[in-house]
Each structure stands twice: as C-alpha cells, then as structure tokens.
Image: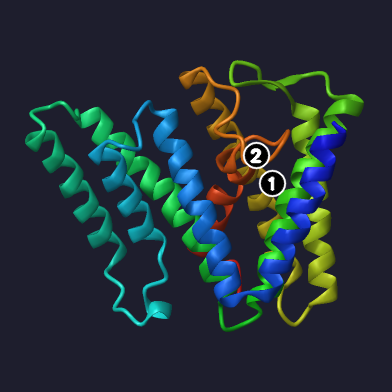
Amino acid sequence: MKQRIISGVLAGAAFMVLTVLGGWYFFALLLFLTIVGMTEYIRMNGVSMKQPLAWIAMAGVLLLFLPWGDLGLNQPAALHMIWMLMFVLLSVTVLTKNEVTIDGAALMLLGALYVGYGFHAMYDIRNADSHGLMTTIMAFFAIWASDVGAYFTGKAIGKNKLWPAISPNKTVEGSLGGVVLSLIIALVFAFIYPDVISIGRAIMIGLIAAVAGQLGDLIQSAYKRVRGIKDSGSIMPGHGGVLDRCDSWLIVFPLLIMTNLLPL
C-alpha cells in the first residue's frame, strides 16, 4: 500500500505539472499514454507486437489521436478515418487468407477508437481557446472525486454489491458516495468560476464524471475478466497499466465533448 501511495502521488504530481504546462508538454504526455495504452490493449488480445495486425492497429490509434490541425495538416473527417482503418484491417484478413480473422480485425478497430479518440478528447479540451486548463482540471478532479468517494464510502458503509459478476468489491453505497463527492467538487468549481460554468452545467458534468467514469471502470474490469488478467499492464508499481488508470477518462472526456458541456 505504501508503494502504491508513493508512486501514485509522484505520478499524479508529474501529470498535473504537464497538464498545467499544456501545449507540446501535454501532447507528449498523451502521446505516450496512447502508445502504451494501445500496446496494452493489443497484448491483452493475444496479438504479438511483431505481427502486422499490431502495426496497423498502432497506426490506427495514432491516426485517431493526433491533433492534425496543430501539426499543420488538414484533418480528415473522423468518419473517414474510422472507415479507412476498417478497410485496411479487413483487407488484411484477405491478404493473410484469414490468418488474421475478422474477429481480430474488429477488436483492433475497437481498441483504436477506444484509446485513440479517448486521449484525443483530452487534448481537445485542454487546448480549447476558452478556459481549457480550468475545464480540464475540473473534469479530472470530478473523476478523481468519484473514485475517492466510491472507495471510502464503500469501505465505510458498503453492503450491497453493485455488479459482483464484473467487480466484486464495488458496492451500491460506494457508487452513490462517488456520485455525491463528484457533484460537490463540480459545484465548487461553479462557485469559484461562475462566469465560466453555471450550477446546472456543473451538476451535469459531475454526474457524467461519476456515472460514466464508474461505467468506464466497469468496462475495463469486464474486459480483463474475459481475458483472465488482473491488470492491463505494469506501468506504475501497485497501479497496473495505462488502461487501468485511464479507463474512466477514456469514457468521460469524449462524452463531455459530445454533450457540449464544457466551454470549448
């Protein structure tokens, strides 16, 4: 536990410094997380990084992650990028005479979208013209508050299992505690920055950070259970891999953009 706390604090501090610095510092951080996260996903599915399928999947995740405009390039439409990646992956099934199956191609497409767009959404929000840093920090704090609230409430009064088939330690009481603390943190930001975020919008952000964030955690737990593994990787002592640490983020940030809740 001591090692877990120390590594978590150090990693959290480094993450916040790079987030505050923004620009290419934050881009480099997210690029690193994208590459490591996709590597974990590929290996979780039993695909060797030496196989062409892994190379295409990695190229696909970068295709969806990269901020084309900031790199001075014309950004293809998102649907076009997803379709092109699908086409290449399906073509590989033909060229390999089904050595690469359609199931394997579909898994790589899913992973590229899950990881690539998830981290891309974080970059977009941080680099927004209007209050990008504040809204990014607000979203992260609401997600972390949900994690903390769920953990301590569950430890204190948790009795009813939330979803034992997927994550046996989570409780309904813990989940509700996470929602409440996430809402409190979101409302604190609304009171500090009333010209940026209204109370109603803060409540919606807090709910999405908690509910979608917890669902993101369960999604990753469900996938690991299917694959028979405890952690997606081992990037930090006691914390597992990138997908273990970022599972909530990868769901929450795209939803915040799609629901137009953050002032971009």
The structure residue drawn at horizontal position 52% and vertical position 64%, both measured from the top left corner, is 257
Q: Residues within 10 Å of mark 1 (few under 14, many from 20)?
A: many
Q: Quadrant of the C terminus?
A: bottom right
Q: Quadrant of the N terminus?
A: top right
Residue 188 vs residue 222, the one in the foreground: 222
Residue 134 vs residue 186, the one in the foreground: 134
- Residue 174 image point, x, y percent: 79, 32
Q: Note whether residue 203 is visible.
A: no
Q: Note whether residue 63 is visible.
A: yes
Residue 175 vs residue 243, the one in the foreground: 243
- Residue 231 image point, x, y percent: 59, 29
- Residue 216 image point, x, y percent: 57, 40
- Residue 227 image point, x, y percent: 47, 21
Residue 181 vs residue 69, the one in the foreground: 69
Which residue was labeled with disc 1? 210
Which amino acid type is marked by label 2? Gln
Q: Quadrant of residue 76?
A: bottom left
Q: CA distance from mark 1 to mark 2?
A: 6 Å
The structure residue drawn at horizontal position 44% and vertical position 41%, both measured from the top left corner, is 39
Lateral position of residue 238 relative to residue 84, left or right:
right
Lateral position of residue 105 relative to residue 27, left or right:
left
Are the residues tagged 1 and 2 within 8 Å (C-beta)? yes
Q: Residue furthest front?
A: 50
Lateral position of residue 227 relative to residue 93, left or right:
right
Q: Which mark is residue 126?
A: none
Q: Quadrant of residue 41?
A: top left
Q: Quadrant of residue 183?
A: bottom right
Which residue was labeled with disc 2? 214
The structure residue drawn at horizontal position 12% and vertical position 27%, both measured from the top left corner, is 98
Which amino acid type is marked by label 1? Ala
Lateral position of residue 141 relative to residue 36, left or right:
right
